Amino acid sequence: MKQLTAIMIGAGARGSAYAQYALDYPHELKFVAVAEANPERLAKFAGRHGIAEERCYTSWEQLLAAGPLADIAVIATQDRMHTEPTVRALRQSYHVLLEKPMSPEPQECVQMELAAKENDRLLTICHVLRYTPFWSAIKRLLSEGRIGEVASIQLNENVGYWHMAHSFVRGNWSNSDQSSPMILAKSCHDMDVLSWLMDQPCRRISSFGSLMHFHEGNAPAGSGDRCLSCEVEPTCPYSAPRFYLGEGMSWARHFTEGLTRDSIVQGLQETNYGRCVYRSDNNVVDHQVVNMEFASGATAMFSMCGFTRDQERRIQIMGTRGELRGEGSRITVMDFLTHEHTVIDIPEQASGHGGGDSGIVRSFLREVRAYGSGAESLTSASASVRSHLMAFAAERSRLAHGQSIDLDEYYRELTGR
């Protein structure tokens, strides 16, 4: 098997997660260059992957100015920093693996899709759920007709109150002006999974949701700007020191490289991760529901909520001959005719996102090696643009107080086609 080479643009948590594949399977993939603005992350990534100093860059512009250096570009920058490096890399004949979401701007998503076609390159979006054993098994069961024709799907994304506070109140995805709205930043995975499982166009969509809790109007009396100096911190479920110095210590890697108690406390004093959840700069919703109608008349309901103990997805799929339920790592299929219950337990996965992080890289490498056969990536730009448009339409509907959005009209409005 030929070893493929890659460059990394953005060596943060997600980029490093995909790059782990090169460390686990060095005969398949090797990183030869990296661009990262954070000097500590740059040095750490280069050290782990044995990248020469002259191939370490502090910006993607510097790296791509060096000319084509590898077969693949993995781009894992922040949401609003995807389009320019992606288009430039495609023009330099890189096959691109791009972190989701593609972009918070619909026109930029279409621009990247067209750039991949114009330059005859793969552009695969990291909708990692499609590559997990759990979601792959659900797709297989539907394709086999185990529950007949799908009539309706209910999908719940339980974000977890601690994850909500970390990523979407204090963290990188807290403000849609700097990142993306919640339906893209967190839930474009869910829009993608629903599009994939239904396997037909979504025709109409409507949505409701709001930032109900995490704002200054709900700040407890006597609370301060930072948890470390707050009098009511001991009684607040969103206490930063309780989380980052306790069960969430590994999540402190997002604001300190050291992961010592002293470095975590310093980070809580100096970064947004130590701020009061009621006095942060966040504006994304903390709960949202989306209703969808598909071409066959089938419907789907998606609910995202930040007020749950666990971080998990639960799905119920109702068909004409049976029902399927999925939760955690267990899938249950119920047959209306025989009343049989089939239980499928998915083994625990070592890779992140239930095996999706390694699964997408493995699939992408296989597609790069076979490029030219005419096969499209499972999460190609074309497939991802369709599910991204569902998310954009849902957000437009939410901002319009639940107005129903016709997807065909919305697409024509965006593209002029």
Image: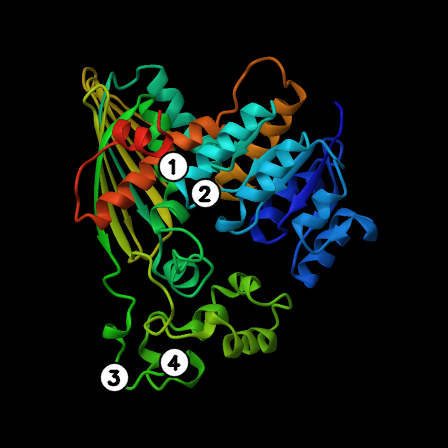
Q: Are marks 3 and 1 in contact (CB under 8 Å)?
A: no
Q: Is residue 393 left or right of residue 55?
A: left
First of labels 3, 1 by sequence position: 3
- Mark 1 — residue? 388
Is residue 346 at least partly visible in the picture?
no
Q: How many marks?
A: 4
Q: Alpha-carbon distance for marks 4 and 3?
A: 12 Å
Disc 2 from disc 1: Cα separation: 8 Å
Residue 118 or residue 336, whichever sits in front: 118
Residue 344 x/y as whole percent: 38, 29
Residue on which the image places disc 3: 221
Confirm or deny contact between disc 2 and disc 1 (CB under 8 A). Answer: yes
What residue did someone put label 2 on?
101
Rendering coords of residue 309 (x, y %): 33, 57
Secondary structure at numbered mark 1: helix
Residue type, mark 1 in image: His
The numbered mark at residue 225 is: 4
Image x and y of residue 157, in percent: 32, 45
Q: Mark 2 packing: few (<14 Cα in 10 Å), some, or many (20+)?
A: many
- Earlier along the polypeptide chain: callout 2 or callout 1? 2
